[in-house]
C-alpha cells in the first residue's frame, strides 16, 4: 500500500473529525486514529514525533503538549521551532523528521491547548534543521502543496512559486488561530463551561471574551484577561451594553434599563444588572481587576 495514499487518507479523516467535533480534538480520538484497509492508523503516541507502524517513509505527526518541557515557539520569521527528540541528532525520531524535510513530506502538527485537547494543523513541512539549537523549523501550508507533492511522487516536474512567502503568511495566520483556540479552551475550563452572567452551559453558545481586546498591546490571551460569556452577553459586553466593575458587579446601561422591549431585554440583560458575575474557583484564573477597571472606564463613557 502506498504511504502517499495513507497520508491522504489521514488528512481526509482529520477533516471529517473537525467537521464532527470542531477544530479542538480529544487526544483519545487521535490516539485511536483511523482504519485504513483493515489496519488501525493512530496519529499520536507517547512522544512528540510519531510514526505509525503502517508508514515506511517517515513520521506522520509532531505534537506540542500544553505542558511540554520543550520551548517550541514561533519566531520572528513566523515559523515554528520544534525541539529535537532528546539531544542526539541521530536519534531515529530526529532522523525521521530530517528525511521528511529532505523529501518534502507533509505532516500533521498537533498543538496542545489543554491537557487532552489538540488543534490539528495540516499539512506542515519541516523546512529547516538546526543541530546547534537542537531544533527543526516547521512551516504550515495549504492543500495545494499536498497536491503538488503527490504530483511530484508521480514523476511530474511541478514548480512551487514563492513557497517561503506563502508558508510564512499561512503560518502567521495559523499562529493567531492557535492562540485563540488555546485562550477559549482555558477560559471556558476556568469557568466550568458556563456563562459568567447567566450560567448557560452549552459550549456551542459560549465564547471566551477578552476584557482588554486582543487588538490592544495589553490584550494578552491569558485567562485573567478573559470571561466566559454566552454569545448574547459577549455581544452586549463588546458593544458597551453592559459593563463589569473591578469588584465583579455587572452594570447595564441606564438607557437600556429604561427601555421596554420584550422578554429578551428583560431577562437577558436587565436581570443581570447589579449582579455579581460567576468567578473561577482558582484565584489565579479570576478576572484581573486592573483590566476590568480599564474596560469599565470605557463603558462609563458610553453609559453617561
Image (cartoon, rainbow, N blue to C red):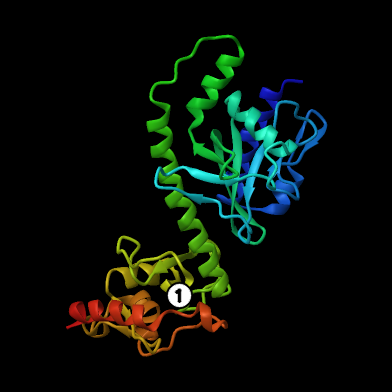
* Residue displayed at 70% across by 48% down: 86
Please say if 206 is above or below 304. above
How many numbered markers are drawn? 1
Quarter location, residue 292: bottom left
Which quadrant holds the N terminus? top right
Left or right: where 270 falls relative to 23: left
From the image, tell me which residue sits under label 1: 224
- Please state which of residues 69 and 251 is positioned toward the viewer in this rendering: 69
* Residue displayed at 70% across by 42% down: 88
Left or right: where 301 falls relative to 7: left
Left or right: where 282 falls relative to 286: right
In the rendering, at what x and y percent does residue 265 appear? 33, 77
Quarter location, residue 189: bottom right
Quarter location, residue 253: bottom left
- Extreme-front residue of the structure: 132
Please say if 140 is above or below 198. above
Which quadrant holds the C terminus? bottom left
Q: Looking at the image, can residue 166 be seen?
A: yes
Left or right: where 273 falls relative to 112: left
- Extreme-right residue of the structure: 38
Local SS, label 1: helix
Q: Looking at the image, can residue 59 be seen?
A: no
In the rendering, at what x and y percent does residue 279 appear? 50, 83
- Please state which of residues 75 and 289 is positioned toward the viewer in this rendering: 75
In the rendering, at what x and y percent does residue 303 appear? 21, 81
Please tell me how crowded label 1 is: few (under 14), some (14-19), or many (20+) other residues with Cα within 10 Å. Answer: many
In the rendering, at what x and y percent does residue 131 appear? 59, 39
- Please state which of residues 157 and 277 is positioned toward the viewer in this rendering: 157
Amino acid at each position: 500500500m502506498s504511504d502517499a495514499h495513507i497520508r491522504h487518507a489521514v488528512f481526509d479523516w482529520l477533516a471529517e473529525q473537525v467537521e464532527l467535533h470542531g477544530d479542538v480534538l480529544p487526544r483519545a480520538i487521535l490516539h485511536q486514529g483511523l482504519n485504513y484497509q483493515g489496519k488501525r492508523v493512530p496519529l499520536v503516541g507517547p512522544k512528540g514525533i510519531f510514526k505509525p507502524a503502517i508508514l515506511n517513509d517517515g513520521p506522520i505527526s509532531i505534537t506540542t503538549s500544553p505542558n511540554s518541557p520543550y520551548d517550541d515557539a514561533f519566531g520572528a520569521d513566523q515559523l515554528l521551532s520544534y525541539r529535537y527528540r532528546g539531544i542526539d541528532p541521530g536519534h531515529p525520531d530526529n532522523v525521521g523528521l530530517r528525511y521528511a524535510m529532505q523529501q518534502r513530506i507533509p505532516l500533521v502538527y498537533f498543538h496542545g491547548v489543554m491537557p487532552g485537547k489538540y488543534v490539528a494543523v495540516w499539512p506542515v513541512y519541516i523546512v529547516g534543521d538546526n543541530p546547534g539549537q537542537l531544533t527543526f523549523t516547521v512551516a504550515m501550508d495549504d492543500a495545494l502543496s499536498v497536491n503538488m507533492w503527490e504530483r511530484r511522487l508521480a514523476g511530474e516536474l511541478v514548480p512551487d512559486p514563492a513557497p517561503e512567502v506563502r508558508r510564512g503568511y499561512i503560518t502567521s495566520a495559523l499562529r493567531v488561530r492557535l492562540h485563540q483556540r488555546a485562550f477559549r479552551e482555558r477560559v471556558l475550563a476556568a469557568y466550568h463551561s458556563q456563562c459568567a452572567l447567566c450560567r448557560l452551559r452549552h459550549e456551542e453558545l459560549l465564547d471566551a471574551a477578552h476584557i482588554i481586546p486582543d487588538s490592544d498591546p495589553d490584550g494578552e490571551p491569558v485567562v485573567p484577561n478573559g470571561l466566559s460569556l454566552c454569545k448574547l452577553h459577549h455581544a452586549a459586553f463588546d458593544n458597551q451594553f453592559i459593563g463589569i466593575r473591578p469588584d465583579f458587579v455587572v452594570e447595564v446601561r441606564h438607557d437600556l434599563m429604561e427601555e421596554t422591549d420584550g422578554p429578551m431585554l428583560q431577562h437577558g440583560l436587565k436581570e443581570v444588572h447589579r449582579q455579581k458575575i460567576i468567578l473561577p474557583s482558582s484565584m489565579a484564573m479570576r478576572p484581573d481587576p486592573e483590566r476590568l477597571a480599564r474596560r469599565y472606564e470605557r463603558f462609563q463613557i458610553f453609559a453617561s
